[in-house]
Amino acid sequence: MAEKGKKMENEVVVKEADFGDIELKISKPSLNADKTVSVHGNFAEIGNKIQSVVDRYKNTVLTEENVDYVKSLKKQFVSLRTGIERERKEFKKVYLDPAEELLNSMCKELLKIVDEGESALGKQLDEYDQKRKNELTEILSDYVAESVEKFALREEYATQIQLKKEYYNKTQKEEDSIADIDLQASELAKKQKEYDAGVELIKAECADAGLLPDAYVRELNYKSATEITLEIKMDKKARAEMLAKAEEGKVTIGADPDSEIAKQLAKATELNSKEDEIRERVLKVTYKASQAKLMAKFFTENHIGFKFIETNF
């Protein structure tokens, strides 16, 4: 136990290690000649004081004699951090925030003027470019018309020629656009020729069988003419087999006896039976495209003559 009046070693340590009065003070910022900003304060002084304490205690071996003081010292470091942060925020509030707010406001006014000029000039340039594109569209449309005439394209094919985006590039050569339009028209002419050949082939296949070609022609949109003609041959074969069986009396060909069209035809048959002569009636038939072959089969298999007077396609 220490003698009375004699200082203990840890008491001396406490006195030597105490921070004492530490307060961060930051002065008003100043603008240098080179347009840099200087901030002055007692940073070095405080830094040295803190560093000396850190160096003294960072490797301290704790004992029963010094642990309470070290705990107290740690609380002082927390207070130092709080004080430094408080001073930083106060400096920012007094000097930086107002300056930033004023700077932003002044620059915002300048940017409004810049935006006005940029928008006005941009609008003029857009209008100028649109005018150029409109004039070019007229020129290109003339080339399209020439290609349509050159390759004898019908309207449904002519409308498929596109004025491509690259035609309007300033680096695009006019002769390259013309060549591409011609190429488009040439490819469409091939498709038109193939379609027409398919239609003629279908008509020829249907002609000797009394089949309606329209329903088959519609299939050219998603089938080849070869596929369709094979389908027609199969339908003709099936029809021939059915007619042969009908002649032998093995099957009865006709509409459903309960259907409306069968009733109407039955009345017509009853009237026709009174006089053995050919009669002609106008019959309006409404049907789906998918029912065209079925309708044609009904008339042909029952030996009823028909012809198209008017259609809606």
Image (tube, rainbow, N blue to C red):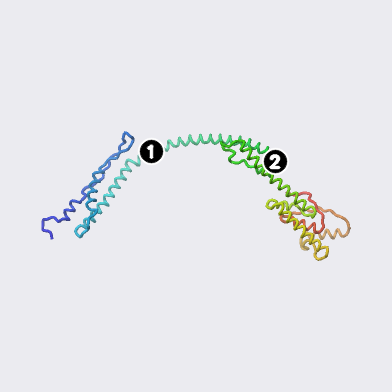
Q: Could you say whether the residue bearing mark 2 is in a helix, strand or loop?
A: loop
Q: Could you say whether the residue bearing mark 1 is in a helix, strand or loop?
A: helix
Taking 283 as reference, is 43 left or right?
A: left
Seen in the picture, residue 44 relative to 257 is either above or below; the reply is: above
Is residue 211 something that shows in the picture?
A: yes
Which residue is the extreme one toward the bottom? 250
Residue assigned mark 2: 151
Residue 45 position in % (x across, y down): 23, 44
At label 1, counting other C-alpha atoms closer than 10 Å, the crowd grade (few under 14, some 14-19, many 20 or more) is: few
Q: Residue at x 51, y 34 (%)?
A: 121
State how far apart marks 2 and 1 are (Cα): 68 Å
Is residue 260 something that shows in the picture?
A: no
Query: In which quadrant of the rendered view does residue 75 lie?
Result: bottom left
Select label 2 or label 1 by which is in front. 2
Residue 195 position in % (x across, y down): 71, 48
Q: Residue at x 24, y 54 (%)?
A: 59
Residue assigned mark 1: 103
Residue 169 position in % (x across, y down): 57, 38
**Considering only order in the chain, which callout, 1 or 2, is on the residue closer to the N terminus?**
1
Taking 144 as reference, is 78 left or right?
A: left
Q: Residue at x 30, y 45 (%)?
A: 88
